[in-house]
Amino acid sequence: MRRIKQRRVKKKFYQLNQYIRSDKLRVIGFKGEQLGVLSKDEALFKANQLKIDLVVVAEKADPPVAKLIYFKKFRYQQSKKQQTSKKKKTQEQKEVRFSPFMAQNDFNIRIKKAEKFLKEGHRVKLAVKFKGIQLARKEFGYNLLKQAIEKLSNIAKQDSSPKMLGRLLITNLIPIKKHVEKQTKNSQLSPKKV
């Protein structure tokens, strides 16, 4: 039987209150104002006066930076930052596949799918797959890609010219930023149906 390895999530441990190791700290106040470089005891005294936590934000700075903030609120802010950074990083490349001799309706459906991907902000790879004797008639594939690029030209621009990779004829499209931004703004403004 095969064992499945479980991913261990690395938990980040923060130094807070009396567990802070450094003697001198650059302290940031509750509202974000600089309080200057203070000793650990002075900073803890201020935190106790305000009845909030003293959390080391940047350990590697010289002197380390600590912030006066409720620890639960600080952890919540950090988790939100991580989630937004993950969302920004993911720009996937989606693939839409055609065949050189396909019906017009199938072609239109695939164009609508590519349009949807582009409006979401993804890169799209258009691929025409040749089977058997179809390789002898590559011009049909080039014409098909040319048609697709023309239909999508208002929301995307071509990244690379069509090229053959084995049995696939491939080209890449990149969304035009204007259309992506309009789509996201409209989705934020429109009320959600319940």
Image (cartoon, grey):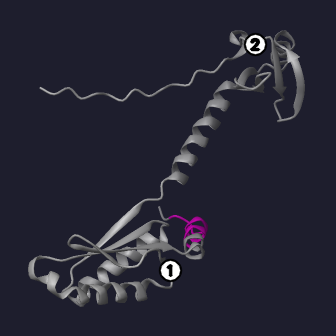
Distance between the Cα atoms at labels 2 and 1? 55 Å
The location of residue 25, given as percent across then percent down, is: 81, 19
Task: Identify the residue shown where x is 60% and y is 75%.
Answer: 178
> In the rendered structure, does residue 168 fall within the stretch colored magenta?
no
Task: Identify the residue shown where x is 50% and y is 85%.
Answer: 154
- When asked about the image quadrant of residue 139, the answer is bottom left
The location of residue 157, given as percent across then percent down, is: 49, 79
Task: Identify the residue shown where x is 84% and y is 9%.
Answer: 41
Estimate how packed mark 2 is, as few (under 14), some (14 to 19) or many (20 or more) residues with alpha carbons within 10 Å. few
Q: Choose between 151 and 140: the one closer to the eye.
A: 140
Question: Magenta residues, as a range?
Answer: 183-192
Q: Which residue is mark 2?
A: 22
Q: Amino acid at mark 2?
A: Ser
**In which quadrant of the rendered image does the N terminus lie?**
top left
The location of residue 176, given as percent across then percent down, is: 55, 75
Horizontally, is 103 left or right of 7 in the view?
left
Q: Amino acid at mark 1?
A: Ile
Q: Choose between 170 and 165: the one closer to the eye.
A: 165
Q: Choose between 58 and 194: the one closer to the eye.
A: 58
Horizontally, is 191 left or right of 73 in the view?
left
Estimate how packed mark 1 is, as few (under 14), some (14 to 19) or many (20 or more) residues with alpha carbons within 10 Å. some
Horizontally, is 93 left or right of 26 in the view?
left
Mark 2 and mark 1 residues within 8 Å of each other at the beta carbon:
no
Q: Which residue is mark 1?
A: 155
